[in-house]
Image (spheres, rainbow, N blue to C red):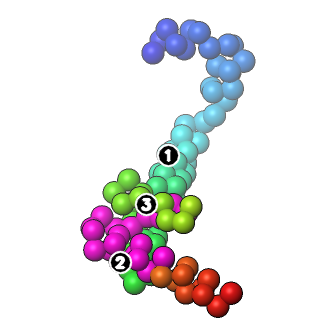
């Protein structure tokens, strides 16, 4: 780690040391909130709609759109069927 530090330009080192210790605490809080925001979504099954983690979900592409479902096969299969059904129903009247 010390070798990497020595490779940094002096301007960048000064910039890093310009932050106070209280900024690091706030930074960690902000990064934790950002991680939760980026890695969570709502289940695309219209009968479920639970908040889920993207990393623990079933990811499927339906009609060119990426959909995320709870980590169980029933939720994913019904959700995929429902999205396709709603799409066919919306196209029927045209």
- Residue 28: horizontal and vertical position, in percent? 49, 45
Gap in angstroms between the C-alphas marked 1 and 2: 39 Å
Q: Is residue 3 above or below residue 65?
A: above
Could you tell me which quadrant the N terminus lies in?
A: top left
> What is the magenta range?
65-84
* Crowd rating for badge 3 (residues with CA inside 10 Å; few <14, some 14–19, many 20+): some
Q: Is residue 33 magenta?
A: no
Q: Is residue 8 above or below residue 27?
A: above
Q: Is residue 33 left or right of residue 14?
A: left
Give the camera-side residue of 88 and 6. 88
Q: Is residue 8 above or below residue 91?
A: above
Q: Secondary structure at mark 1?
A: helix
Q: Is residue 77 magenta?
A: yes
The residue identified by callout 2 is 78
Q: Which label's residue is closer to the chain start, 3 or 2?
A: 3
Which residue is at 54% across, 40% downward?
Answer: 24
């Amino acid at each position: 780690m010390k070798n990497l530090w020595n490779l940094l330009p002096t301007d960048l080192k000064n910039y890093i040391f310009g932050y106070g210790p209280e900024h690091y605490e706030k930074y960690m809080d902000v990064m934790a909130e950002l991680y939760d925001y980026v890695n969570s979504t709502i289940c695309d099954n219209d009968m479920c709609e639970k908040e889920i983690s993207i990393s623990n979900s079933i990811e499927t592409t339906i009609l060119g759109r990426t959909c995320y479902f709870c980590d169980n096969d029933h939720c994913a299969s019904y959700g995929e069927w429902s999205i396709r059904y709603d799409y066919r129903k919306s196209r029927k009247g045209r």
